[in-house]
Image: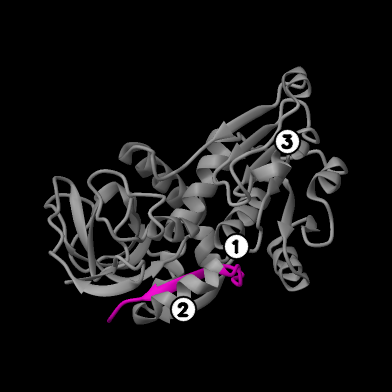
Amino acid sequence: MHAMLVDERKALVWTEVAEPSPGDGEIVIDVHAAALNRADLMQRAGEYPPPPGWPQWMGLEVAGVVSAAPPGGRWKAGDRVCALLGGGGYAERVAVPAGLAAPVPRGLSMAEAAAIPEAFATSYLNLCVEGGVKAGDTVFIQAGASGLGMAAVQMAKALGAKVVTTVGSEEKEKFVLALGADVVINRRKENVARALARHPVDVAMDCVAGPDLGPCLETMARGGRWIVIAALGGTASELNMNDFFRRGVKLIGSTLRSRSAEMKAKIIAALEEKLWDSFSSGKIRVMLHATLPIARAEEAHAILRNQENMGKVVLTVAP
């Protein structure tokens, strides 16, 4: 089979590799679509290696058709599934623990289904497990027009929260308002911390961090939970520790990729139980910015690198 590897020049090369060899309890999926995440760019740059046991090429979420499955399990050959991966999605086939797969929601395309697992599982982990979001909370989500932001804004609204989010353009502002965001901060026009001071948040899901983290923490509601999932804005910030501990603010670091297969399976099962009907009914929408053949992976990466996307970017693999 073929997979998209990164050569010594950091270029993407469609290369022949060994077929996946499934372990106990694993299924093999013939990949029809693989969604992109900013983690792919980090992995390509050599900054975010996959967990042990996963392929070395990129790809954290796919949709496709089961081609091999252990007897007596939930899945059988021919089933249409989407799956959360530790890596290996940019390929013609991938082996994955059966518990990390879920059926393609009724009425959704393969491209739409591929855009669900990583974004919505990350949102569930951080909003529900780490953040404990409940109805009436105010939730802050950085980069609301991104693929992850698209999922998090809708999930927070489904949980009954007020949503505050950031964008970088007026076009993206319209996009996130259509998703249900209540307050939109255009970071190119307004200081984020000053804007948050008018809307103290109970839970934040932050992929930016950087120098603004400290000032933003000072605006949180008492007992707030600020969850950092990436540091796209930089790795250093200065905190006012007196203010921090007096108000009981919690600063949490969190990544989905490093969690155990068992925990990821529980999250996928929870998503299927709670959200699959909402996907099929259109109550929660999978927003696709672009769908490109895998031969145009360089172009797809450039869209993410330049922050052009509103929603997810997906690569399709034959058939």
- Give the residues in magenta: 306-319
Residue flagged by tag 2: what amino acid is it?
A: Glu
Residue 244: x and y in percent read 73, 24
Residue farthest front in this picture: 9
Name the residue at 16% across, 57% down.
Answer: 69
CA gap, disc 1 to disc 3? 23 Å
Side (left or right) of 47 relative to 67: right
Are the residues flagged by discs 1 and 3 in contact, CB closer than 8 Å?
A: no
Q: Name the residue under label 2.
A: 299
Comparing marks 1 and 2, which lies closer to the viewer? Answer: 2
Residue flagged by tag 1: what amino acid is it?
A: Ser
User: Helix or strand or loop: what does disc 1 sit on?
Assistant: loop
Give the quarter of the image for residue 81.
bottom left
Are the residues flagged by discs 2 and 3 in contact, CB closer than 8 Å?
A: no
Name the residue at 52% across, 63% down.
Answer: 279
Q: How crowded is mark 3: few (under 14 residues within 10 Å), some or many (20 or more)?
A: some
Residue 3: x and y in percent read 25, 69
Residue 151: x and y in percent read 57, 57
Q: Mark 3 points at which residue?
A: 214
Residue farthest right in this picture: 198
